[in-house]
């Protein structure tokens, strides 16, 4: 919701296994801006040890790669930082971090943009990526304390 109380972005994700076992039913989240214009998507790539995602714009051009820490890709229980890398140069342009906040006694999900060259549309896609990562790797694990792929 923007300051005028209008919906700013809609994220759509199909039902799929969080872990993407054997590369089938990988996660994908699409982003739309009113009145339904396609903004782009975040797609999970199949890997064994390093979670990896591709962020694409409305023309299907690869904008960013998101890479997580080397772990079992079905669940993470601790702090983790995902690097957002430029698809063109491979340089880190942002980060998505999931951390435990001791003073608030809760988990925090933060998206940091050290680069001021990221457009608002691309920031909206990265916010969607942060939500997808939270769901896939942390939310289910917090509730069940086991792999989200079972």
Image: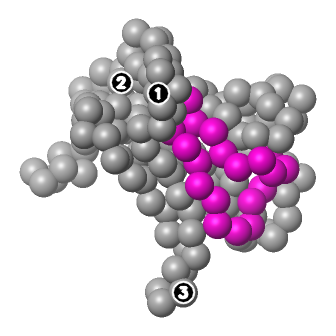
Q: Position of residue 1 (x, y in %)?
A: 24, 51
Residue denoted by label 1: 86
In this rendered view, identify the residue nearer to me: 139 or 88: 88
Q: Characterize the local packing of mark 3: few (<14), some (14-19) or many (20 or more) Cα atoms within 10 angstroms.
A: few
* The stretch drawn in magenta includes residue 24: no
Residue sitting at the far left: 4
Q: Which residue is mark 3?
A: 102
Q: Position of residue 25 (x, y in %)?
A: 77, 28
Which residue appears at 46% of the width and 27% of the height? 86
Instruction: Name the N-terminal-most of marks 3 and 1.
Output: 1
Front residue of this view, candidates 148 and 95 = 95
Q: Is residue 69 above or below residue 59?
A: below
Q: Which residue is mark 2?
A: 39
Residue under the point 43% across and 43% down: 94
Bounds of the magenta segment: 64-84
Q: Is residue 4 above or below residue 98?
A: above
């Amino acid at each position: 919701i923007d300051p005028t109380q209008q919906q700013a972005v809609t994220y759509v994700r199909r039902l799929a296994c969080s872990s993407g076992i054997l590369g089938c039913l990988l996660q994908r989240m699409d982003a739309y801006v009113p009145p339904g214009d396609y903004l782009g998507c975040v797609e999970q790539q199949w890997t064994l040890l390093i979670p990896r995602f591709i962020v694409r714009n409305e023309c299907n051009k690869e904008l960013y790669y998101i890479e997580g820490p080397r772990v079992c890709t079905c669940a993470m229980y601790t702090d983790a930082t995902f690097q957002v890398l430029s698809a063109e140069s491979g340089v880190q342009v942002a980060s998505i971090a999931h951390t435990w906040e001791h003073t608030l006694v809760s988990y925090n999900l933060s998206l940091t943009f050290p680069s001021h060259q990221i457009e608002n549309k691309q920031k909206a896609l990265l916010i969607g990526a942060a939500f997808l990562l939270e769901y896939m790797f942390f939310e289910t694990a917090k509730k069940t304390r086991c792999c989200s792929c079972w």
